[in-house]
Amino acid sequence: MASKKDQLQVWNNCLSVIKDNVSPQGFKTWFEPIKPVKLENSILTIQVPSQFFYEWLEEHYVTLLKKIIKKELGAEGRLEYSIIMDNNNHPYTIKVPTSDRKATKNAPVAMPLDLGESPIKNPFIIPGLRKIQVDSNLNPNYSFENFIEGDSNRLARSAGFAVANKPGGTAFNPLLIYGGVGLGKTHLAHAIGLEIKAKSPEKTVLYVSSEKFTHQFIDAVKNNTVNDFSHFYQMMDVLIIDDVQFFSGKEKTQDVFFHIFNHLHQTGKQIILTSDKPPVEMQGMEQRLLSRFKWGLSADLQVPSLETRIAILRKKMYADGIELPEEVVEYLGYSITTNIRELEGALISLIAQASLNKKNINLELARQMIDKFVKNTAREVSIDYIQKVVCDYFDLPIELLKSKTRKREIVQARQIAMYFAKKMTKSSLASIGAHCGGKDHATVLHACRTVNNLQETDKHFRKYLEDLEKKLSIA
């Protein structure tokens, strides 16, 4: 049997190759939590934290993993997973080898872990009451069809789709979707509910905001009907609570929700929660409730990439039967980087401006509207937009700017983009370097010094900077 040092060394060698083949976010999410536990007979066993983790690796990274293992351990090299499961709070481990099938990019994730026990019946429900009609409070516009998938939300969307296909029957119970304002948490929660209703009309699905839940509970306390309140929520097949972080500091509300949560979970019903932060960062919440939030999957929604933002705008335009010049769509995508809600709001404002003032929608109108739209915030230009302006000015494809080429004109354009990114954004040097083809902070500092020196000695170069600064200032 090989020593522990051997298995760590082999896995570290694997990680060094993996790091060059996946995104930084993908590496942090899917490979940093893995622990090598054994190396024996050319079989490396790695421990992964959940069944879903294993499924995701198999769907998206199996080909890469197999190649690296064979490179490290030879033709006989194999990989086995040690999966930590948590069944009724009793951890145990199962082992499965890597499959021989090829990974399929963005394939839907199959979720096992059926709940084998038959549902426990609630003795408090009055016979016949189960058949009452409940308004689900779901917005039909917030469907999966209208939810644009990108790297920023792929995990949450895949998990949500799995839950929608098998509510209460996956490892994701509860499914907690978290992220900043306007990134699509509520949309995704509604989409899951709508899909469940479409596939299983007999299921009782209820969407409710945490604020409404709290007010209903306060009314129940006043009217001495807390039991009726609890029993009503215990009747749900799928309960969706939006902005659960607002339960913070409300001890009585947390207590009643704790008992509702327990009942639904024990009877195999699906719970979906949204929050602006993960459970580990929630303040003012009871530990027993936080521990239950961690039972299933916490999936985050991040700020969408430029490509996703543009795709969202095009989807919105198509749905509303609107056509805009491509340069206007790109300008909106580059300029509104904070969240999806603001992005869609900017599009609506632009269309309203053009309609009310009987003006054609062009780049100039878009710039004027963006200035007004964000006048109450300290707007900064994005690194993406700076790169676009620089590339347009020098007539270069943006891919070339981000490449490793050392051609003089490309290097100079890249350095100028870094210079303006440092000057006009709050991004760190490391972040600027990452946007410019994976350069480090030292390269960015060198670029800024080079640009400062050239503008003092080269009048043509100084003219480039003046022209570009004007273009970026009116952006």
Image (cartoon, rainbow, N blue to C red):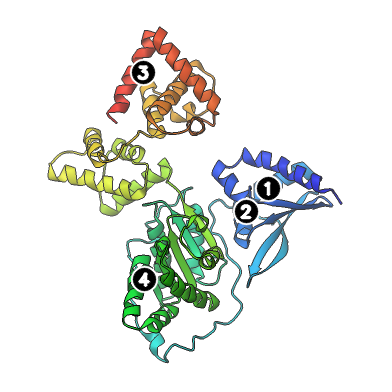
Label total for image: 4
**In what element is the residue under mark 3?**
helix
Instruction: Find disc 2 in the rendering and name its residue.
Output: 57
Mark 4 crowdedness (10 Å alpha carbons): few <14, some 14-19, many ≥20: some
Instruction: Find disc 1 in the rendering and name its residue.
Output: 65
**In what element is the residue under mark 4?**
helix
Instruction: Find disc 3 in the rendering and name its residue.
Output: 465
Which amino acid type is marked by label 2? Leu
Foreground tag (4 vs 1): 4
**In what element is the residue under mark 1?**
helix
Tag 1 and tag 2, C-beta contact below 8 Å: yes
Foreground tag (3 vs 2): 3
Q: Earlier in the sequence, mark 3 or mark 2?
A: 2
Q: Position of residue 296 (x, y in %)?
A: 55, 64
Tag 4 and tag 3, C-beta contact below 8 Å: no
Mark 2 crowdedness (10 Å alpha carbons): few <14, some 14-19, many ≥20: some
Which label belongs to residue 213? 4
Tag 4 and tag 1, C-beta contact below 8 Å: no
Q: CA distance from mark 1 to mark 3?
A: 46 Å
Foreground tag (4 vs 3): 4
Which amino acid type is marked by label 4? Phe
Q: CA distance from mark 3 to mark 2?
A: 46 Å
| Residue 132 higher or lower than 347, as above or below | below
Is 109 left or right of 252, judged from the image as shown?
right
Which amino acid type is marked by label 1? Leu
Which label belongs to residue 151? none
